[in-house]
Every structure is written in C-alpha cells, then in structure tokens.
Image: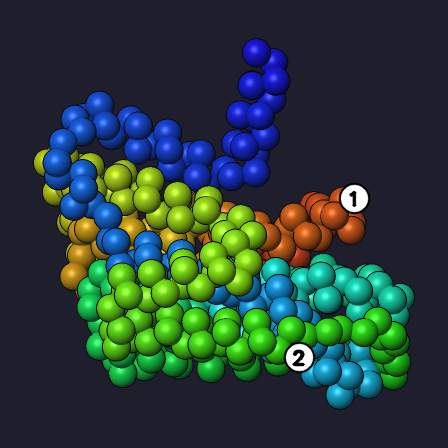
C-alpha cells in the first residue's frame, strides 16, 4: 500500500501539469457524462504528428549528431562570452527544427560540461535561463517549433505563409534581447578542452533525416499524417525499437487530457458563455494570463474552443511561455537539470528566472500592442 502511494506521489511531483489536468478532466466528467461526443474532442492529426516528431528526434539524438554539431560550433569560439553566445543561440536555432524540449535536452548537458570544465559554474544559472528563453521563443515562428504551435496550426488550418509572419517581429525582438543580455558577460579568454571522441552512425543518421523530412512534409500537409505514421513506426521498429521508450508520452497524455477537459467545458452552457465573452474581447491577455496558471500547451488547447482569433491566441501562448516557472513545460526541464548540479541555489535561480522572463514578457507585450 505504501509503495503504491509513494509511486503515485512520485508521479504527481514529476508530472505536475499532467496530474492537475487529469483531476480537472475527471471533475468535468461529472458534469458531462462520457458519450460518443468525447471522440470528437481529439485533434488526431496533432497527436499523430507530435508522436512522430518525438520518436524521430529521439532517433536523431541517438546518432550523436546534435552533440557533434554543438561541439564543433563551440570550438569556433575562444572566449566566455562567445561560448555563451553559441550555447544560447544554438538552442534558439535548434528549437526551430526539433522543438523546445528537445533543443534543451540536447544543449543543457553540454552547457554544464563546458562551463564546469572551464571553472565557470557561476554562469550556469544565467546561461540556463537564457537557453530556456531561447528554447521557448526560438521556435515560435515555425509550426513545429513548439507543441502549442503544432496544435494551433492544425486546429485552425492556418496558411503556412501566414503562420511564419505572425510572430516574426517577436522572434527578432527576442534574438536582440538575448544578444544584449549575453553581451554583459565578461569577454575573457576561454580554452575548451574536449578530448572525447564522438562517433556518428551515418546509416541511421540518413534514415532519421529522411523520416524527419517526412514528418515536416506531413506538418505542411504535403503527405497524409497516417502514411507518415505507418512509415515511422515500421522503420523505427526495424532500426531500433528502444526509441519508442524515449518518447515523452507524458506530453502526449497532457494533450489528450486537456482535449477532454476543454471539450467538456465547451459543452457546459454557463461556463462556455462566460469564457467566450472574456476570450473574444481579450484573446491576447486571456491567453497570457492563462499560461501563468496552466502553462502554454493546455492554454492553446483550452482557449481554442472559445475563439476564432488564432493570430492573437498564437501570440499569447508563445510570449505567454515567459513569466513564471510553470508557464512553459520546457522550463521545468531546465529546472530539473540545474538542480542536479546546484541544488542549493534553487531560490537564487527562481528569482533570476522570474526577473528575466518578466522583463522579456513585458517588452514583447509592448511590441505586440504596437504591432496590432
């Protein structure tokens, strides 16, 4: 009995957002009994594409190509500021390709190794925070850069060329702000020593690149999702079925649970009318505020049921990823990694994280208000 309770408590602590989502979904089920309409809640294209992207990226990481590219890029710089620039903007641009959580998973361990081996541990919190902002903001102009983008792109059937332009100005603004913040780092000479050899499996790499291209083509509606799903599953099963174990199923489950929650809320008359009035008139602010309570991905799923203003909703769930720690699921990845190395500096990290995120959020909100 105690073992079961401990396991449940461990799950709740490690997957707080998913746990809360499950509770909320169960509560709504008392008001909306389970029926055939539940099957219509789910955006199956988004779930299929998200799964394919996660498993293919897991395969790409297994080839060590990300580590090889990262180390070669860092090897080009010889100062502390230059290395931090490389780490932060490497995360920023990789996010446009493999999504925020994967870019952080790739770069954070490398960041620790570089800073620790050169006795620059005091810059770890700052660099991690800049990388988190870069990861949350770098992919906001692409349909597959963030999970919430993938959902909204599919849900509203947003034209591809229009999607790239909606958050272009905000993306440029973030890049400038990141550059300014990192420019305050002392530009002292820094010699990186990296003697470990990285081997890349070229055959697997080529296969995963092809699969990645198929997933991207599916996102852009060139290839049907189901065809891509079948090809990905069969290929991964043949190459290395252990990649299926590396998929973030908690993220997929969070999507599913919030589909149920938002679908039920949309069928409760009084609540639907109240939320609709708030969201329709103030989509941008409603989205940003909601992100601070239930994070960005659940906000995108939830509020999409109440507004057709996808431009403001898309902006809100992206810049709303800034703010407090729980406003983005990816931010928790960074926190876990930081506490592995400096567990005693939690409050210092939290204060610095909140300060930088709040400043970025205010500036982006001002830019957005001027733009629209």
Q: Which residue is mark 1?
A: 344
Instruction: Please tell me whether mark 1 or mark 2 is closer to you in this view.
Output: 2
Name the image quarter holding the C terminus.
bottom left
Q: Quadrant of residue 202?
A: bottom right
Residue 293 on image: x %, y %: 42, 44
Residue 193 on image: x %, y %: 88, 76
Residue with the most extreme front position: 238
At 56% from the left and 68% from the top, the residue drawn is 60
Q: Which structural element holds mark 2?
A: helix
Label disc, if present, on residue 217 of the rendered structure: none
Name the image quarter holding the N terminus.
top right
C-alpha separation, residue under disc 1 versus residue under disc 2: 32 Å
Q: Quadrant of residue 189?
A: bottom right
The reply to whether residue 276 is visible in this rendering is yes
At 33% from the left and 61% from the top, the residue drawn is 230
The scheme the figure's colours follow is rainbow
Q: Which structural element holds mark 1?
A: helix
Label disc, if present, on residue 69 of the rendered structure: 2
Q: Please give left or right for residue 39 compared with residue 167 in the image.
A: left
Q: Please give left or right for residue 202 compared with residue 265 in the image.
A: right
At 34% from the left and 61% from the top, the residue drawn is 229
Picture mark count: 2
At 36% from the left and 65% from the top, the residue drawn is 231
Residue 209 on image: x %, y %: 49, 76
Q: Please give left or right for residue 270 compared with residue 49 in the image.
A: left
The reply to whether residue 284 is visible in this rendering is no
Up/down of 239 relative to 80, above or below: above
Residue 178 on image: x %, y %: 59, 75
Residue with the most extreme bottom position: 76
């Amino acid at each position: 009995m105690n073992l079961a309770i401990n396991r449940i408590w461990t799950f709740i602590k490690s997957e707080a957002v998913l746990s809360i989502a499950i509770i909320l979904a169960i509560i709504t089920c008392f008001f909306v009994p389970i029926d055939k309409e539940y099957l219509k809640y789910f955006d199956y294209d988004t779930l299929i594409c998200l799964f394919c992207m996660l498993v293919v990226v897991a395969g790409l990481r297994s080839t060590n190509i990300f580590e090889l590219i990262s180390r070669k890029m860092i090897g080009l710089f010889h100062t502390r500021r230059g290395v931090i620039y490389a780490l932060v903007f490497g995360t920023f641009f990789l996010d446009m390709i493999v999504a925020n959580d994967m870019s952080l998973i790739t770069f954070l361990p490398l960041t620790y190794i570089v800073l620790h081996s050169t006795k620059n541990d005091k810059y770890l919190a700052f660099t991690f925070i800049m990388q988190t902002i870069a990861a949350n903001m770098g992919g906001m102009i692409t349909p597959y850069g963030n999970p919430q983008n993938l959902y909204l792109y599919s849900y509203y059937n947003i034209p591809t060329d229009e999607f790239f332009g909606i958050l272009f100005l905000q993306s440029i603004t973030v890049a400038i702000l990141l550059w300014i913040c990192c420019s305050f780092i002392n530009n002292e000479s820094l010699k990186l020593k990296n003697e470990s050899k990285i081997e890349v499996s070229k055959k697997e790499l080529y296969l995963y690149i092809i699969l990645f291209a198929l997933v991207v083509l599916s996102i852009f509606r060139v290839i049907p999702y189901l065809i891509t799903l079948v090809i990905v599953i069969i290929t991964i099963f043949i190459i290395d079925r252990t990649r299926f174990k590396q998929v973030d199923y908690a993220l997929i489950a969070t999507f599913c649970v919030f589909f149920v929650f938002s679908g039920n809320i949309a069928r409760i008359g009084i609540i639907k009318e109240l939320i609709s009035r708030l969201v329709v008139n103030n989509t941008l602010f409603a989205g940003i505020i909601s992100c601070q309570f239930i994070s960005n991905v659940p906000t995108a799923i939830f509020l999409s049921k109440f507004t057709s203003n996808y431009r403001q909703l898309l902006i809100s769930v992206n810049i709303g990823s800034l703010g407090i720690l729980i406003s983005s699921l990816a931010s928790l990845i960074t926190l876990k990694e930081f506490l592995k190395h400096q567990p005693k500096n939690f409050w210092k990290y939290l204060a610095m994280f909140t300060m930088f995120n709040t400043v970025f959020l205010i500036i982006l909100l001002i830019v957005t208000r001027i733009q629209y």
